[in-house]
């Protein structure tokens, strides 16, 4: 506390003799006790809280504050340029910090300061008036006391705010660590310990959402405050646009439809809901769908991986799928590329439409007789294998993705 403090400047203008100071000092224990009793009775946040050792601690703090106030007056009359305010302000700062750690807001503490100032002044003013101080001096004394209380309360507010900010930073670090552990698929016992440290209650399920970081704030404002956010880059995904990862709690069942509505228009990718400790699987599926470029880029609705399971499954082993396609379609290998493509296209449609010739013709925009002719050629090439369930399964998988047309020569 520097000597430029408003309280210090006011103290320098006040003349208080040793006789009055001694009476005030002798009355400090009574003032402290009555101040704490008034706070307990009038401030709901402290009702029943100031008992035993805690009450003694607060009474002692009040005595120190009032004692510091008297020291301030005595210092103001001496040639010593130092100020006794620093310890009191540090104590007030610590008081505000402690209230934040206890989970109480500043409302109760500020109310306590107001009650304390009123009671303390009532007791102190009685002593000053009985001591014969002039009315002008008593008024200056009141101004000084309330300025001092203002400085103490300001220090407590600062302590409270700094503690909340510090606690918030610590919790954010814990939450970030938990998020990375969840995405890495660490064991459940380690995840539970991290969740407890971060004061994050595990939900039933978590769902991963990937979206452009520029849309992050707008979406977060509409989601549960328990939603986790990863500040890290998406591992294994190289994109031109910076993407954010969200872990949304309990967005399963009807909650998934609500989540999809929230994500509408934000170019998001929606992974599956998974038990909270297995959300890494949701992330892996969403990241894969994003990397494969599934869905319509211009669509308003989010890309829902639950609607692209076949494509995701077939993309798991591209080389294996290529080998299956080569093996299953080997009867077409000797044909000209254009002919092989038309027959493969027809066979795919025939499998998907379960042999309904008119539906195949409508799908390929050809005449039903063309379908009949092509299927005749395919039966010649494949023989009885077209009726073998294992062959039908291989062909269905091989032709799940439409065959690519041959490049023109």
Image: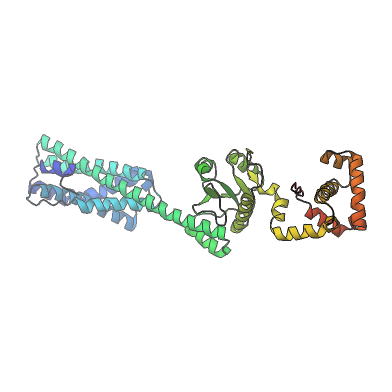
Name the residue nearer the viewer: 322 or 220: 322
**Residue at figure coordinates x 61%, y 46% from the top left:** 269
147 relative to 166 in the view: left or right? left
Instruction: Give how far across and how far down residue 173 sits, in percent.
Output: 44, 56
32 relative to 223 in the view: left or right? left
For the question of whether residue 287 can be seen, the reply is yes
376 relative to 302 in the view: left or right? right
Name the residue nearer the viewer: 378 or 138: 378
403 relative to 382 in the view: left or right? left
User: Residue farthest to the top?
Assistant: 136
How is the rendered protein coloured? rainbow
For the question of whether residue 50 can be seen, the reply is no
287 above or below 111?
Answer: below
Instruction: Give how far across and how far down residue 38 sits, in percent.
Output: 30, 45
Instruction: Give how far across and how far down residue 391 sits, in percent.
Output: 85, 58
Report the number of numbered marks: 0
Name the residue nearer the viewer: 333 or 189: 333
Instruction: Give how far across and how far down residue 203 sits, in percent.
Output: 58, 53
Q: Which of the 4 quarters of the picture holds residue 145? A: top left
192 above or below 8?
Answer: below
User: Residue farthest to the front?
Assistant: 409
Q: Which of the 4 quarters of the picture holds residue 212? A: top right
């Amino acid at each position: 506390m520097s000597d430029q403090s408003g309280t210090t400047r006011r103290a320098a203008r006040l003349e208080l003799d040793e006789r009055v100071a001694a009476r005030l000092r002798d009355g400090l224990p009574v003032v402290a006790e009555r101040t704490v009793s008034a706070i307990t009775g009038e401030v709901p946040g402290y009702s029943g809280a100031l008992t035993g050792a805690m009450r003694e601690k607060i009474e002692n703090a009040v005595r120190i504050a009032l004692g510091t106030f008297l020291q301030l007056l005595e210092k103001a009359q001496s040639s010593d340029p130092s100020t006794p305010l620093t310890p009191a302000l540090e104590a007030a700062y610590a008081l505000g910090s402690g209230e934040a750690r206890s989970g109480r807001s500043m409302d109760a503490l500020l109310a306590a300061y107001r009650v304390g100032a009123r009671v303390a002044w009532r007791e102190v003013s009685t002593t000053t008036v009985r001591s014969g101080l002039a009315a002008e001096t008593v008024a200056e004394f009141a101004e000084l006391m309330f300025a001092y209380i203002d400085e103490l309360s300001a220090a407590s507010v600062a302590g409270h705010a700094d503690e909340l900010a510090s606690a918030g930073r610590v919790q954010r670090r814990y939450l970030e660590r938990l998020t990375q552990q969840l995405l890495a698929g660490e064991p459940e016992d380690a995840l539970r310990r991290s969740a407890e440290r971060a004061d994050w209650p595990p939900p039933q399920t978590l769902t991963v959402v990937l979206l452009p970081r520029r849309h992050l704030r707008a979406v977060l404002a509409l989601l549960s405050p328990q939603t986790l956010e990863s500040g890290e880059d998406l591992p294994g995904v190289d994109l031109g646009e910076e993407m954010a990862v969200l872990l949304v709690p309990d967005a399963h069942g009807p909650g998934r439809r609500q989540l999809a509505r929230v994500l509408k228009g934000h170019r998001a990718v929606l992974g599956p809901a998974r038990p909270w400790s297995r959300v890494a699987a949701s992330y892996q599926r969403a990241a894969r769908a994003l990397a494969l470029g599934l869905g319509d880029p211009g669509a308003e609705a989010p890309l829902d991986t639950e609607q692209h399971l076949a494509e995701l499954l077939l993309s798991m082993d591209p080389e294996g799928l290529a080998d299956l396609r080569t093996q299953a379609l080997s009867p077409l290998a000797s044909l000209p590329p254009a002919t092989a493509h038309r027959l493969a296209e027809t066979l795919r449609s025939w499998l998907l439409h379960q042999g309904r010739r008119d539906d195949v013709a409508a799908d390929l925009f050809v005449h039903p007789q063309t379908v009949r002719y092509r299927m005749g050629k395919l039966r010649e090439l494949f023989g009885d294998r077209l009726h073998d369930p294992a062959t039908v399964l291989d062909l269905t998988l091989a032709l799940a993705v439409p065959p690519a047309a041959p490049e023109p020569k």
